[in-house]
Image (cartoon, rainbow, N blue to C red):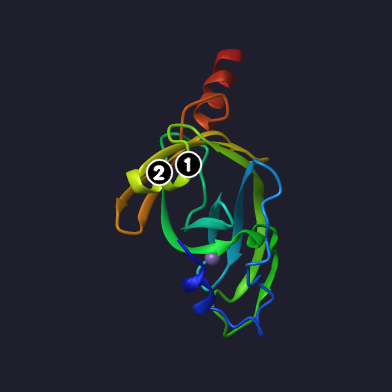
């Protein structure tokens, strides 16, 4: 894990995206962010903190809170931690050109492994998100090479569960 690929793809004299390397960890909590990216192909970038880096996946259809839905999440290059607060326009002609907005952000904790490094190595791990839109337990499962699946786990924050509760109330 490093910023080598991230830096190679970008010209920091042209894009306002952070170059990284200046960030220091603030406290013990780990952050996550999900950025909506209006690039040539609209997608969501889901990122989980690992030290001074953000482990990143591009999710073409975005996250779903329905535990029966599996969303393709393509692992992309690690980003600097400072990228978590980035919103703005990546100039035309530059890598990832288009508008980036923060769709959700918050903190997370690993569930079944102490560190995300271990989860990545195992190819499947669970984690809890404390965001505004993304809440409760989630799972990432590696399928093949860079292709993972992001799946909501069944809990009080999953959509189907909400639907069932609504039905019971009727
Ligand atoms: Mn993107």
Q: In which quarter of the image is residue 168?
A: top right
Q: Quadrant of ligand 1?
A: bottom right
Which quarter of the figure has residue 107?
A: top right
Q: Which of 59 and 47 is in front in this view?
A: 47
Asked if residue 122 lies left or right of residue 78, the reply is left
The C terminus lies in which quarter of the figure?
Answer: top right
x, y percent for residue 144: 28, 54
Q: Relative to 123, is 17 on the left or the right?
A: right
Ligand 1 within 8 angstroms of badge 1 C-beta: no
Visible in this render: residue 170?
Answer: no
Q: Which mark is residue 115?
A: 1
Answer yes or no: do the residues labelled 1 and 2 have beta carbons within 8 Å? Answer: yes
Q: Say which mark, if any, is on residue 98.
A: none
Say which residue appears at 40% left-offset and 43% top-offset. 118
**In the depicted structure, whether residue 8 falls above or below residue 166:** below
The residue nearer to you, when weighing 9 against 60, is 9
User: How many labels, in total?
Assistant: 2
Residue 65 showing in the rendered view: yes
Describe the element under mark 1 as helix, strand or loop: loop
Q: Which mark is residue 118?
A: 2
| Residue located 58% across and 76% down the image | 97
Separation of residues labelled 1 and 2 (CA atoms)? 5 Å
Horizontal and vertical percent position of residue 24: 68, 56
- Quarter occupied by the N terminus: bottom left
Q: Is residue 109 left or right of residue 117?
A: right
Between 95 and 19, which is closer to the camera in this rendering? 19
Expressed as whole percent of the image width and height from the top left, the position of residue 142 reads 34, 48
Position of residue 130 measured from the top left corner of the image (x, y, whole percent): 63, 37
């Amino acid at each position: 894990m490093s910023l080598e690929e991230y830096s190679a793809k970008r010209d920091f004299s042209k894009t306002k995206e952070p170059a990284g390397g200046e960030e220091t960890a603030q406290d013990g909590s780990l952050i996550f962010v999900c950025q909506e990216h209006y690039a040539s192909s609209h997608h969501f970038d889901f990122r989980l903190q690992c030290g001074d880096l953000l482990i990143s996946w591009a999710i073409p259809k975005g996250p779903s809170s329905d535990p029966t839905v599996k969303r393709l999440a393509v692992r992309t290059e690690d980003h600097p931690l400072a990228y978590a607060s980035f919103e703005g326009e990546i100039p035309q002609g530059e890598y990832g050109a288009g508008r980036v907005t923060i769709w959700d952000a918050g903190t997370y904790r690993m569930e079944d492994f102490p560190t995300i490094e271990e989860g990545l190595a195992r190819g499947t791990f669970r984690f809890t998100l404390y965001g505004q839109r993304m809440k409760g337990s989630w799972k990432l499962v590696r399928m093949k090479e860079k292709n993972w699946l992001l799946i909501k786990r069944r809990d009080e924050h999953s959509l189907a569960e909400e639907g069932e509760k609504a039905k019971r109330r009727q």
